[in-house]
Image: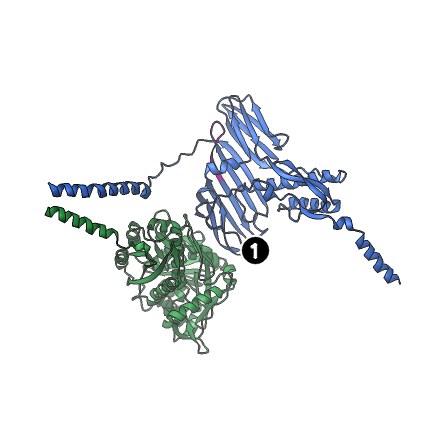
Chain colours: A blue, B green
Amino acid sequence: MSRRTLVIGLCAAALSVPSVAGARTVSLPWPPQVLPPAPPLAPKVAGPLAISPRFFRRVPNQERVVVGLDADGTPNAVRVQQTLTLKRLGDYVFAIPAPVTTVLPGPGTGSPPGRRTNQILWQGFSPGIRKLSVLADLRVAESAPLLPAKVHVERTAVVIENVTGVTAKSYTADVEPVGLGQVVERIRNAIRRGFTAEGLNVEVHGKEQPVDVRVAVPLLVSGTIRSGDVVRRFKAALDGIHRTTLRLAGVGRDPKISMRVRTVDVPDRVRATQSVRDQLANTIDLELAYARKRQYDQFLAAADPTGHSSTTYVYRTSPRPVSAAPIETSGSGGNTVGWVALVVVLAAALPVAAVVWARS
Amino acid sequence: MRRLILVVGLCAALAGCGGHKDPSSTKTKTVTIAVNAPFSKTPYVGQTIADGAALAASKAAVDVNGVKYRFRIKRYDTGLSPSTAARNVRKAISDGAVAVVDEGTGVDASWQFARDADVPLAITYQGGEGLVDAAKRPNVFRIAPTDHGMAFRWAEYLIPKKLKIAVITDDSSYGQQGAKALHEAFSENMSSVATKLTVPADAPDLSPQVLRARRAGATALLVWAQPTTIASVLSAARSSGWKVPVYSSPTGEDPLVRQQLANHPDWVDGLTFASGRPTAEVGAGPFLSFQRDLENRYGVQLVGVKTPDGAQVVQPPDYAMYSYDFVNVLAAAIQRAGGTGDKKKILSALNQVTVAGANGDQRGFNENNHEGVVDDDVYFATFDGMTYRPVKDDPLSATLVPIEQRR
């Protein structure tokens, strides 16, 4: 009898969850859908070669992006040193898409990088651990617009601007709080481990109301501005939302800037004491800001986009690189037009000339 | 008036020429790939290069804008003579070859003829350092292990063994290229080298030189030489009772070494050579399939010796896979270039395409590097009972499966 009671009780309990059963599972706004796709840089490539899944989560990515600046702060050169460390035994063949102009072996690389149109190519065998390092010069027009900070040199001031901010489509809704709590923990865990956050689904009751949110990467900018013998140091956090610019007034003429920019931890404003709607909004903020941060932590795509990445940006006033005079193309295209015109003229003129000659 | 009739007639004839069938409009186009190799002097090398290229040519299918490209192989014998090899390349170009697959002899002269005609030249045997340079020789490619890669792999493998190595090279150009590469590789660990000896390539007896190595305190011999020299070194060492470990260049796997020592099979045991790996991580499947196709078409390549239990020994077609892979890369480049009309486009496309190689590896070149075999892909194998298997004390070699060599 007691068993029967238990079964009836369980059935009743199951039937008493209609509100949960009426809920829908939806994911938090998915970064690839609601954030701009770049960075990482993604020029068009002919044959993408992705790394074998065996290396997933075992390829830490470190980058140092050195940006040359004109006197007015316009980028004139972008060079990246990317270091990948393969942490498994086995073959590797993969390509990193990048708008490269030159590709050189980086310090301590275990094998030399190859170059194809818009690709850095890696191929070899990892005996258990293998460091791959490359120095790549990038086409400025395609890479500079994706840098996290811009520098403007005005008459007596230097302005540094965090340009990582974007508006993303999001939503607000009534969500099931326990599930939301688990999602927050997943995001926090991913942040702690430096991986992409996954499995971010919540139970939603009723309809979601669309809202726009502002997403930006907090940056720490630090460096010096030298003007003559005067050196001025600066250091500031630009969160990209409440504070986007740093204005350094009173600098002398012809300032020489040397600045480091790196991403810093995204703010976690989720608190258990908040309303569920506020918790959801702050969770989405945390998720998207972290995803955006990961984008800037991979200026060049990492071999394993979900794994650990970090990038330091260095900006320096420096002379515009002297580019070699463009080699005159053998110009089959240009010459072809000339040859075609010549043939047309000859085709018309020769019979006429021949007839004139024949009648003379 | 007669002049007018003549002119009208000529115009009509010229107009008729315009109606001649445009070759590009044909549905099938056959293009020639030249194989320039020492068929008469080292038949194994020449034959294996030609067979690999011919197998790929028979299977390659390129279809561009409704035109099907077929490939045929034309052989040119270098006789291991650089001047003949260079002459052959000129001849091949005048014969309309779209590419040259080359053993490597004479490339220092012949590459320029090929460059002037925008013809790619692919080395599939010799690994000499100066032969390939993507910047200076943009039309020269290679799918074969480089001397540089093998020498550094030897250093990486042997130095931790704390051996005193006698480096023996012969005076052939192959041996001298190897001597240069080994010198670079061991230059920072000269304490590992007991002595360096250059021996004549055609010497029937190398006992005095091997004795010198022994007296220099050598505890290992590293021989980079023609197959006959390797056989002579083994013969001199073993006949004197010296059981020193012998390591060699890829020529150690040449059937000629085993043929020369057929009466003393135990003298071959323990010989360890370096070469490009015949199998990739995916296992032996792709290579065995390639080997089967090659044997079905051209027959089994018997070494001419037997295992201790009486089985015939066959030579795995490891070098054939390089010429096979190049022809496939070339076909992919022609596809990408939109046909054979613009040879510059084909040269450029060769830097951009990747194909699955005969051993399951990815094969291709790039703008920085025209080497199709990366240095990491050098492995070591040791003979036992006239067949060889990858060594177990090297991380890459230990991952490879042995190839069956008994029939």
Q: Quadrant of residue A238?
A: top right
Residue B367 shown in magenta: no
The residue type indicated by label 1 comes to Arg
Q: Is residue A73 magenta?
A: yes
Residue closest to the eye, A265 or A48: A48
**Which residue is the site of mark 1?**
A54
Is B291 rendered above or below residue A224?
below
Task: Tell me where the magenta segment starts and ends, as one range.
Answer: A70-79
| Residue at 46 percent of width and 40 percent of height | A137
Q: Residue at x 20, y 41 (%)?
A: A349
Residue B48, position as x, y percentages in the image? 37, 65
Q: Position of residue A251 (x, y in %)?
A: 53, 22
Asked if B395 appears above or below A251 in the picture, the reply is below
The residue closer to the viewer here, A185 or A252, is A185
Would you say residue B369 is visible in this rendering? yes
Q: Chain of mark 1?
A: A
In the rendered view, tell whether residue B272 sits above or below residue A120: below
- Quick one: which residue is furthest to the front in this view? B1
Q: Residue furthest right?
A: A1
In the image: residue B61, left or right of residue A16: left
- Specify the quadrant that holds the C terminus of chain B: bottom left
The x, y position of residue B312, in whole percent, is: 42, 75
Q: Is residue B193 left or right of residue A264?
A: left
**Residue in the foreground of this view, choosing between B7 and A16:** B7
Describe the element under mark 1 as helix, strand or loop. helix
Q: Residue furthest bottom?
A: B310
